[in-house]
Image (spheres, rainbow, N blue to C red):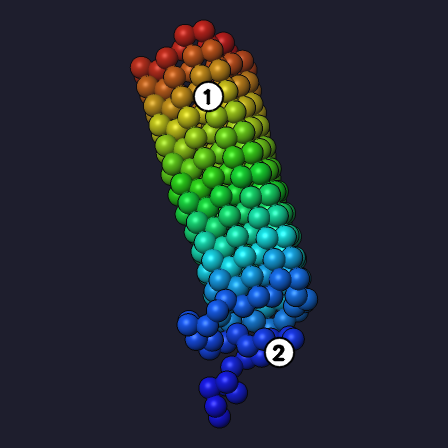
């Protein structure tokens, strides 16, 4: 069998598997690839702008630096796919499965990821600003230096995520689960964490000034050296939390629970205490 015959043929006569790295990237803009079998396909650098890939199987596919702006990937299988450097702006990934995928340095600005499976995904230095991640499962994902500015993560699961030095400016994290998460050095200015669960998470040296943490559960969390200037902690549970050296100037702690809370060297100038 020839090399060409051994490759997998895509719809419309486009070859993918076994493509030579010397070939020009595929142009599949506006293509209809619904339910296509593309597992382990080589689509590196491919132009898939506005392509329809709903329910497509892209298991372990190579989509490095692919262009997927405005693409439709509803319920697609992208488990363990390589999407590093991919352009997914405004892409629709509702219900897609991306467990273990690599999206490092990818651009998901304004992407729709509602209910998407993102367990263990690599989002190093990725841009998810203004993306919709409501009810997504991000447990054990790596978000190092990722940008989630103004993203909607309400009711999302961020259990044990690695979000060190990540950016969550004005992000919506209401009712989100952030148990055992690592947010040290993260920027969460004006983020909304109302009723979020931050049980035993590490936010040391993070910036949470003007953040909303009302009714949140911070039991056993580490907030050492955190900037909480003007933060809203009304009704929050701070039992056993560490606020050593934290700046709580003008913070509102009305009705907050401070049982065994550590406040050594904390700045409380102008703070409203229980």
Residue most extreme to the front: 24
Using the numbered discs, state the Cα–Cα distance from disc 2 to disc 1 in whole angstroms. 55 Å
- Residue 76 vs residue 221, the one in the foreground: 76
Residue 13 is tagged as 2
Q: Residues within 10 Å of mark 1 (few under 14, many from 20)?
A: many
Residue 135: % across, % down: 61, 44
- Residue 51 vs residue 144, the one in the foreground: 51
Q: Comparing marks 2 and 1, which lies closer to the viewer?
A: 2
Residue 259: % across, % down: 44, 20
- Residue 10 vs residue 37, the one in the foreground: 10
**Which residue corresponds to mark 1?**
209
Q: Residues within 10 Å of mark 2 (few under 14, many from 20)?
A: few
Do we see residue 81 in this rendering? no
Image height check: is 89 above or below 129? below
Residue most extreme to the top: 270
SS at badge 1:
loop
Identify the residue shown where x is 37% and y is 12%: 267
Image height check: is 206 above or below 35? above
Q: Is residue 172 left or right of residue 178?
A: right
Residue 87 is tagged as none
Image height check: is 31 above or below 136? below
Cβ–Cβ below 8 Å for labels 2 and 1? no
Among the two numbered marks 2 and 1 on one chain, the one whose residue lies closer to the N terminus: 2
Identify the residue shown where x is 61% and y is 48%: 90
Q: Is residue 106 left or right of residue 110?
A: left
Identify the residue shown where x is 48% and y is 69%: 24
Identify the residue shown where x is 60% and y is 66%: 28
Q: Quadrant of residue 131?
A: top right
- Residue 174 vs residue 39, the one in the foreground: 39
């Amino acid at each position: 069998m020839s090399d060409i015959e051994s490759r997998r043929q895509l719809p419309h006569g486009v070859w993918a598997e076994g493509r030579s790295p010397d070939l020009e990237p595929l142009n599949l803009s506006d293509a209809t690839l619904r339910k296509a079998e593309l597992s382990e396909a080589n689509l590196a650098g491919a132009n898939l702008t506005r392509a329809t890939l709903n329910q497509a199987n892209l298991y372990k596919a190579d989509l490095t630096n692919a262009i997927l702006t405005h693409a439709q990937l509803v319920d697609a299988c992208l488990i363990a796919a390589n999407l590093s450097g991919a352009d997914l702006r405004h892409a629709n990934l509702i219900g897609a499965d991306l467990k273990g995928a690599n999206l490092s340095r990818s651009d998901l600005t304004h992407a729709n990821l509602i209910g998407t499976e993102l367990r263990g995904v690599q989002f190093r230095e990725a841009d998810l600003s203004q993306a919709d991640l409501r009810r997504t499962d991000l447990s054990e994902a790596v978000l190092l230096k990722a940008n989630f500015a103004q993203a909607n993560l309400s009711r999302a699961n961020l259990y044990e995520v690695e979000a060190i030095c990540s950016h969550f400016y004005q992000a919506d994290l209401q009712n989100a689960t952030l148990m055992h998460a690592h947010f040290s050095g993260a920027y969460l200015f004006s983020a909304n964490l109302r009723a979020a669960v931050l049980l035993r998470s590490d936010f040391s040296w993070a910036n949470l000034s003007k953040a909303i943490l009302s009714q949140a559960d911070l039991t056993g969390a580490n907030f050492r050296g955190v900037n909480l200037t003007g933060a809203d902690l009304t009704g929050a549970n701070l039992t056993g939390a560490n606020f050593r050296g934290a700046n709580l100037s003008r913070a509102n702690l009305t009705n907050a629970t401070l049982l065994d809370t550590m406040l050594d060297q904390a700045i409380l100038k102008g703070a409203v205490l229980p």
